[in-house]
Amino acid sequence: MGFTRRDILRASVAGAFATGATALPTQLLAANKTVKIGMNIPMTGDYAPWGLPGLYGCEIVANNINTAGGVKIGGDTYNIEMVAYDHGYDTEKAVQGYKKLVLQDEVKMVMMLGGSTVASVLPWAQRRKMLTTTLLPSDITPESEYLVATCESHPLYNVTGVEYLKAKYPDAKTAAIVTNNDAEYGLQSAATYKAAFEVAGIDVVDVNLHGFDITDFAPIVSSVLAKNPDIFCMATSFYVTPLMEQLYHQGFKGKIISCTLDYYDEIIAKTSREFVDGTIFQFPDFDDPALNDPGVNFPNPGDFDAKYRAAHPNDWSAVSWEYPAILLNWLEGAKAAASVDPTAVLKALRSAKNPEFVFGGGQWWGSQLWGLDNAVVGRWPVVVVENGKARIQEYRSVSGWLEKNKDVLIKHMKELGLRTV
Amino acid sequence: MELVIQSIINGLIQGGFFALFAVGLVLIFGVMGVVNFAHGELVMIGAYTIWLVHAQYGFPYLPTLLLAIVLVMGIGLLMERFLFRPTRSDPLAGLICSIGVLFILQVVATLIGGDGPSKQVPPPLDGTLVVLEFIRIPYQRLFGLGVSALALLTLWYFLTRTRLGWALRAVALDREAAALQGININVISFIAIGVGAGLAGLAGGLMAPLTNINPHMGHNVIITAFIVTIVGGVGSLSGAVYAAIIYALFHTFVTVYLGGTVATICGLILMVLVLIVRPTGIMGVRVSE
């Protein structure tokens, strides 16, 4: 006796029901809501290294959260979806991208790099009450209520490197600062370094500013080295590699301190490991054991570093972990607010007396300099290249330095024509 | 004094690079009447070739340098055949076509290398020549200066001592008269852009280990090339070489003594002053209609 066509149909229907019944709980579990987080960043052009690596980092963090079942906010469980827009550091595109992210994608927060692109979106962001983040707290104004800098406090953290240098090398008495002459990155950083050197009792013998059209750094380095500084300070990162190369060839023997040292392996390849060893800067690799310090608020940095470098082996930069850290800040705020609404999240973030700053010790700051306490400052690592590898030497307090020396900083900001309240 | 000598050497090295790409631009303009806005991008492609083939795939530097010259020369020849020749009667069309090529080459470079950080090429020649204990010249820069000088001498020999060179100069002086003498304008245009683009490829290849390489690096190159061309005298090859050296020394000394920002401004002021005081440039000649 064989199966009839009707028997097979009956069995198929029964099987389908049975399968559906067993799959039901899983489907229910998977029915998380989705919250979209926007990134309006440069992914092409000169500023791309400060945008794209951050998106890669956020995708790793979001994927970790989603594969673990999502994040519980209020009564709902959410998956995180990153939505990015490439503005190429163009202010007009930044406005377009911002509106697209908010109106079309309905994101609940927009992360940005900072500078003129943030200034271009601010009026609309304020009216729209959209939570926006920047890596440059100097973007904050007395009116920019919805703009926060919860991770990088560029360039305030540079003071920790100078403090370390002074403590470690007390014989270094003079410094020369080289940086590009833009008000967003270069001059802010130069003013901070000048203040930090003054506080440390180190004389600044030269502040050498240059534009973005420089193709040959030999004359600049020759000019600076003619003043015999004990310390060569690079205040921004655009041209660290050619500057380091020239320092190497022109035989500089003093101490080198830099805001960033992105792609330092390439610098070693162009100079030597011995030359780069000892360079002080501010941005750690995330496989650094010192990041297991209990004060650090970044879950499993070693795992993050490994995943990142496996997926994007040549793209690690200072921002690789910064945008993810901001995403983690937002999650804490959303959990505290029990809502993904931007106003509620901002309120929750701002009400935290000790916000979960990535390196710990965070507190809201900024009104003395920019008119609003919308930047988080806390501890920051001092990183030194040792045997060709960046390693954290210690954490120092940016907020502690500011408490004692903010007037010196304001003086140097004003000297370089920068906005302060 | 030490700083002065070091600055002269730095300026001469920079002048060698400036001369390479400015002479190419002048050659193309002189013979074809086209302002090639994509010339900076030809330099960029030369640099990218070194980064990709030498730095990424480990091919030896010197053969890669030759490859960069040939590749960029090939791009130049394609531009001549398919863009500049069909638009020869309209110089504006040629200029617009070259702007189109500029963007295309930038996108090609982005597709090949991504648009992340600037690319770096470790110098094939390591080490530094130290003279009198205070003059320090990296061997890679010395090599660049030597090759630039050799290339410019070879070009000078070609233009002044060979029949083809004479023909090329004749076309640059008066295209119609040259054609009436039996000179094939198409062939000469082909040679002019081949040589001009080849020099741009060489400049890019030599600069690659010494600078940040990115798809937009051609902007600075073309601005410098225009300044040098105007100061030297539009259409004057010898003027371009002199102007490249003068401008590089000027820029270097202003950078050293007044800073990089001031140097950029002064470079442009120099160009404006030349246009006001001597509109034909250092070596240019006034041509009556």
Image (tube, coloured by chain):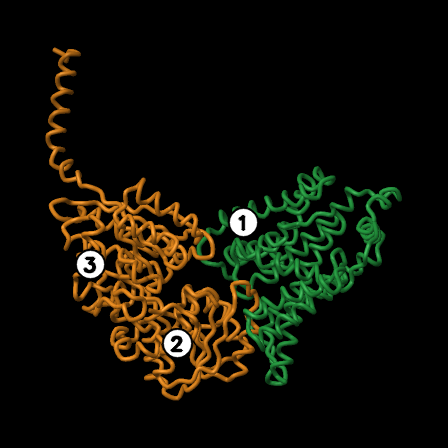
Based on the displayed image, in which of its 4 quarters is residue A367 positioned?
A: bottom left
Residue underneath mark 1: B106
Q: What is the distance, in whole Å, between disc 2 and disc 3 at their CAs? A: 31 Å
Residue drawn 39% across and 45% down? A96
Residue underneath mark 3: A349
Mark toward the viewer: 3 or 1: 3
- Drawing shade for chain A: orange
Based on the displayed image, in which of its 4 quarters is residue B13 positioned?
A: bottom right
Q: What is the distance, in whole Å, between disc 2 and disc 1 at their CAs? A: 40 Å
Q: What is the distance, in whole Å, between disc 3 and disc 1 at their CAs? A: 43 Å
Residue underneath mark 2: A412
**Does residue B30 lie above or below B239 as drawn?**
above
**Image quadrant for the N terminus of chain A?**
top left
Asked whether, in this view, residue A217 is left or right of residue A32, the answer is right
Q: Which chain does the numbered disc 2 sit on?
A: A
Query: Which residue occupies the foreground of this view, B65 or B6?
Result: B6
Mark toward the viewer: 2 or 3: 2
Residue B186 position in % (x across, y down):
77, 42
> As shown in the figure, which amino acid type bears the numbered disc 3?
Leu
- Drawing shade for chain B: green
Determine contact: label 3, label 1, CB under 8 Å.
no
